[in-house]
Amino acid sequence: MYKAILSRILQTLIVVFTLVSVCFLIVHALPGNPFTGERAMDDVVIQRMEASFGLDKPVLVQLGLYWKNLLLHGDMGASMNFKGVPVSSILGQSFPVSFQLGIVAMLMGCGIGMPLGIVAALYRNKWPDYLSMVVAMMGICLPSFVVGPLLQLYVAKPMPMLNIAGWMQAQDVLLPALTLGFGVAAYVARLMRGGMLEVLNQDYIRTARAKGVKTLDILLKHALRPAITPTVTFLGPAFAAVMTGSFVVETIFGVPGMGQHFVDAVTAKDLFLIVGLVLFYGILMGLANLAVDIILMFLNPRLRA
């Protein structure tokens, strides 16, 4: 088990290193200059600014210096778009907001999707199954930029305790988290239904039913653990996708998270901010997948070998 975990950690480090290095080279290949904007600047000024950020050196030298500063000093560079503010400071301010939003969205997604999937499997080809799958299909088909405004108009507007937009009160996380979690709930419901149907058709479940074991005991003690495996496998990438794909939701609800920095950095060709965000999200994806692997090892003892 420990050998498998160490192998996953090594794979994650290799993937993150490759991801960041390729992103660094791709950003350099993009057309345009991060120091040219609406106001024209003298070429001498641009050259001095490039030299201050180390952009006057060859690309591979810049990449080597970036990894050297990051590994030895923990320096992720300074943002060109935010007038030299350290990238670590920008991420430190926005990450807790996005993390809180992502956690609540995942809890809502699992809290809605798992019961829907279980009910659909128990009442296969009956109206609860059809109703659950209709809700799941809506979650898959409706994009967040449609769900968000609908929640603002028909949920937040009639309820004075909920703000239409902003991040000032504890309850402000509910609507953006529900918008993000609705899509997660849809996939969780379908995966949970498929996994539960497969398990409920096994011989040992039929034997338990023949012995008179209650349906609730069958679900909790015998069926839930093996049926939840596909859902757990999905939740790792889903969490990272919720974190990285929250830009639209953050814009709709005025959430000061990390998603806005991603688009702003690409628009301004802010090299170090883009690479810092990719590095951060790569590590987050690796940790999420590692957590999923560990959970699967506990759910299925055969994977520990």
Image (spheres, rainbow, N blue to C red):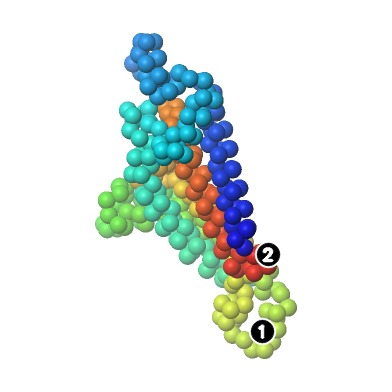
Q: Residue furthest front?
A: 72
Q: Is residue 278 above or below residue 243?
A: above
Tell me the residue at 62%/58% (across/down).
3
Counting from the top left corner in percent of width and height, residue 200 is at 67, 74
Q: Which residue is painted at 64% across and 89% down in the image? A: 212
Residue under numbered circle 1? 209
**Spot occupied by residue 188 in the image (x, y as percentages of width and height):** 56, 60
**At numbered mark 2, what does the secondary structure look like: helix, strand or loop?**
loop
Specify the quadrant of the image occupied by residue 25: top right
**Relative side of 49 to 18, left or right:** left
What residue is drawn where x is 59% and y is 68%? 298
Instruction: Return the residue at label 2.
Output: 305
Residue 172 is left or right of residue 147, and the answer is left
Q: Does residue 143 appear anywhere in the picture? A: no
Q: Position of residue 181 (x, y in %)?
A: 47, 55
291 or 268, which lies in front? Answer: 291
Residue found 57% across the figure and 82% down from its top: 217
Label 1 Cα crowd, 10 Å radius (few <14 / some 14-19 / many 20+): few
Q: Quadrant of residue 259?
A: top left
Direction bottom: furthest residue = 211
For marks 2 and 1, the one nearer the N-term is: 1
Disc 2 marks which amino acid? Ala
Q: For residue 129, which numbered disc appears in the image?
A: none
* Kind of residue sitting beneath label 1: Arg
Front one among 42 and 223: 42
